[in-house]
Image: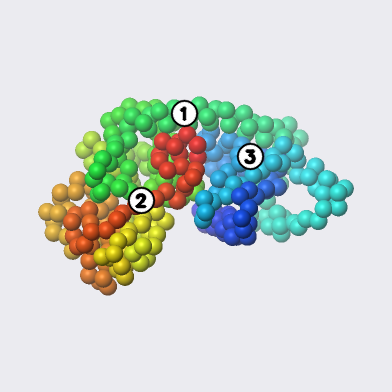
Amino acid sequence: DGQGNLMDAARRARLDLIGRWRGDLSHVLFAHTQDDVAETFLMRLARGSGVEGLSALSEARPVPGPNGGWTLLRPLLGISRAELRHHLRVLRIPYAEDPTNTDAAYLRTRARAALAALEPLGLTAAGLAATATRLRSDREVVRTRAAEVCDRIVLSPGDDPLHLGTLRLDRDAFARVERSTRLRLLSAALQLTASSDYRPRSDAVAGLLDRLDGGGAGTLHGCRAVPRGPVLHIFREFAAVQGHETRAGELWDTRWHLSGPEIEGLEVRALGWQGGLPPEAQGRTGLPAGALAALPALWDGETLAAFQPLGIGPGYGTQLLSPLAPRTGTLQEMLRTA
């Protein structure tokens, strides 16, 4: 929803600001407490989250960024917000209150009020935080299962440069896996393909899986999922990259790096629906048209100058980087750790 997008944008802005402020510091401590764990639990419960979302906030979280990124630490998850404030007052440590903490327009503020109302029923912040912590053990089990399934059903791109950036799953093998694991795998695949630091909402992923099971395709999280014959293709949605433009040698769509002496000065943009390609060339790729359209190509103004996967124009080096590194670089690693 709109507020969800606003809060996500605010989280990203805060992390970016802290990442630039930290200088050479590799670790930054956050003052999240037991109350934050309980409030997050309630908020995710309202969104219909499963084990992955309801699990407790992690005590350490890698944050991607320049020079290997940095690590966010939460050493105070075992104490309440009231305890923290008491210690700050006793030790005369100055602190600032975020004005949004009392603004009922924000979901977290309303979750905080709900916690106070639920306390007479025994649903305390400490109890909910303990439940979230216990769910972390269950999360490790389901993560391991999903990663093992992933090892079997993800098809290798081999040496085909066209398949870079497109996840391909064995469709029949995927269909035989229990639904909870398929949902987790599909969600992680969308996150990795979109280069996002968060996953799509659980109910949206469930809706997409239903469409795929019915033989249809779907769009979610800036990605397209298209079943074609024995393969399920998951790739960047053209609309999500349309208009993105960089120069050769610069990062495009947070993960593509095209470089070489013969392409200096050219612009990197999505190939697009036309791309100046003859129909027979598009037919040889084995990819859905949308996957081809969302791949990076080199342009000289409005003229397609180079698209190496199909041998058009001068050669150049292509790297598909993971903006989620060092947290993960592959779907299997993401399922085990993210």
Assign a secondary structure to mark 1: helix
User: Which of these two is toward me, 5 or 319?
Assistant: 319
The residue depicted at 52 percent of the width and 50 percent of the height is 68
Kindly state the secondary structure of the residue where label 3 is placed: loop
Q: Which label's residue is closer to the chain start, 3 or 2?
A: 3
**Residue visible at 42% across and 43% down in the picture:** 329
The reply, left or right, for residue 328 in relation to residue 82 is: left
The residue type indicated by label 2 comes to: Leu
CB-based contact (under 8 Å), mark 3 and mark 2: no
Return the residue at label 3.
59
According to the image, label 1 marks what residue? 144
**Which label lies toward us, 3 or 2?**
2
Q: Which residue is mark 2?
A: 320
What colour scheme does the image use? rainbow
Residue that extends furthest to the left in the rendered view of this protein = 280
- Identify residue type, mark 3: Glu
